[in-house]
Amino acid sequence: MTNVPEYFGSLVFDDRVMKARLSANVYFSLKETMETGKKLDLSVANAVAAAMRDWAVEKGATHFTHWFQPLTGVTAEKHDSFITPSPDGRVIMEFSGKELIKGEPDASSFPSGGLRATFEARGYTAWDPTSYAFIKGKTLCIPTAFCSYGGEALDKKTPLLRSMEALNRQALRVLKLFGNEDVRRVTASVGPEQEYFLVDRAMYDKRKDLIYTGRTLFGAKPPKGQELDDHYFGSIKPRVAAFMEDLNDELWKLGILAKTEHNEVAPAQHELAPIYTTANIATDHNQLTMEIMQKVASKHGLVCLLHEKPFAGVNGSGKHNNWSIATDTGVNLLSPGETPYENAQFLVFLTAVIQAVDDYQGLLRLSVATAGNDHRLGANEAPPAVISMFLGDEISAVLDAIETDAPYNGTEKRKMKLGVDALPRFFRDTTDRNRTSPFAFTGNKFEFRMVGSSDSIACANIMLNSAVAESLRQFADRLEGAADFDAELHALLRETIIAHKRIIFNGNGYDDAWIKEATEQRGLLNLKTTPDALGVLMEKKNVDMLTAHKVFSEVELRSRYEIQLENYCKTVRIEALTMVDMARKEILPAVESYLTAVASTAAAKKAVDPALSSSYEQKVISRLSALVEQIDARTDALELAMVKLSAVSDITGEAAGIRDEILPKMRELREVCDEAETVTAESYWPFPTYGELLFGVR
């Protein structure tokens, strides 16, 4: 395919298709529903469903599905065909408005965190008209929300849409104070940069750890890793380039705005970045992107690894969540303006984000908490677990001037008191980007860099949208009743900066001195692991905020706590069991076989001539024999710890046990197994090494 504009979005029931296939009345009614949330009339739904069916059938589709995002972290779908029996014994293709709007998949096997009993199978899907339907294979996929029989959200889309609405409501209140009467809607926009690894399928198939867990649980460091920085932005290898070309074609047909691709820092690591779109659609598109990456990789004899830390000793993979807020009139509210008026408005939204990140740093941290991401955060390739914000020198200088009521010593030296002396024009931040910051301002957006590569971006954006909505609510409550708006605005900005400047840090986030300063002097949270982070979810302040904005109910929050901890425990349990299996069935037999071969060589030497030296063989035998004993003992210790953990019935206690007992024993077992790999002959080692995996795709 060469003419991208012709086939871009060809598998999407988008605005172009709707205009061509729907009557004017139906089209405008649907658009009103999409833009304002107005309830869709059944007659309109029937007309839309008929048009969708005809379009999909013409494209070769035979089935439809309500495509949703349960709390498993991946998407789900149940396929129904369009066929309906006709009186003559044949079939016709039908699809009704009721089938479009609502579905009833069996919800009994999806995680619910106690929102419904196991025997209560009912779950309902509801069409999300703000995200276009698309065709995948021979199936029409309809993006939907997913809820329980009692109406509780069982998915990630529903709270994301709620958070976007909360942000919209509060942002409109603030904008009205600045005279923006023409603005009808404010939307969060997101562009997630997706990192991933590509490895050869034949090698992948020989490693149980990659198959079962998505990451390598054993592996000695190869002679070369990423030390030379020669892979980053390097020439893309032909096999990878062919994969990227096919991936782009598939994504573009689905209307996904894949824009930038390049080699990342680690060998075999790459990145794909899309153009911004609304947070809801960006989330749908990112879920699709991850799925299609894996499918396209398979066609090229590759496997796409999305785990946050598939290889020890080289960089892991993240998903930088570039977030901004914009009006339906085209104004980016995080972009410095050209006039004092526009800059005052910008500063209100900027300080709202600063307050939100400080007040709800725990929620932002837990939004990216997973067993996989715990291995990545703070590992000198990703931000630390401590949340802080990077603003750059120029924006920081502006805030300092407001705080101290001093002249601004930037591009123009003008007094910073709003409404008294004109706020100076200041340019977009020109300082270097800080790659060590978890939450960095990069000109007209914030880049939340803690999100893991396999994560749904929904969780991070739910918490970010909600926290900023709360800041804006507080600002609007105060400013709406102000007798002197300009004076109150200046006081608000100054007080907010003073109260929350502890969260701003423009230095090196990897420095141990910063972690000490952040926690001991500034009082910032350092939630190093998933159990630590999830513990803050049910704190009263967080529950009150999220329920007040109707993003979650308290029972929905409790369910998320249970589900995420359970997922953490299950993930590490699978890893531990895989380690035991590989150690017992592969590593120990391989080392023993090599030991036998070395001992035979030593015996053969002595048989030929007792005077021949066998010091090398004796040294290898001695070292490997000791390692075999250690591997066996540490495997037993890990197994025993797992047995003891089975007796813990409380999920919080189990997660703590995983963190404090199981993970350390896994590290201890890996240490001796990796050492054994460095001594064992390559031909005896039972699975592909790091060197083969990282440099095997050419």
Image (tube, grey):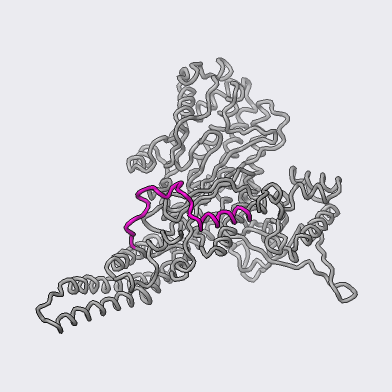
Residue 650 visible: no
Identify the residue at image location x=41%, y=46%. Answer: 384
Q: Is residue 244 magenta?
A: yes
Asked if residue 492 lies left or right of residue 502, the reply is right
Could you say which quadrant of the image residue 326 lies in?
Answer: top right
Q: Nearer the viewer, residue 555 or 26?
A: 26
Q: Is residue 432 visible?
A: yes
Q: Nearer the viewer, residue 534 or 375?
A: 375
Viewport quadrant of the N terminus: bottom right
Q: Residue at x 33, y 77 (%)?
A: 589
Query: Taken as a whole, is the magenta stretch helix, strand or loop?
Result: loop
Q: Position of residue 485 (x, y in %)?
A: 62, 22
Q: Which residue is located at x 61 percent, y 25 percent?
A: 342
* Position of 494 relative to 271 (above/below): above
User: Among all residues in the image, which is located at the extreme right?
Assistant: 87
Query: Would residue 412 appear left or right of 601 to someone viewing this image?
Result: right
Q: Within the magenta stretch, is there residue 475?
A: no
Q: Which residues are magenta?
A: 220-249
**Image coords of residue 429 (percent x, y):** 50, 30
The residue sitting at the bottom extreme is 607
- Above or below for 73 versus 490: below
Of 540 and 684, the residue lying toward us = 684
**Rendering coords of residue 501 (x, y %):** 45, 32
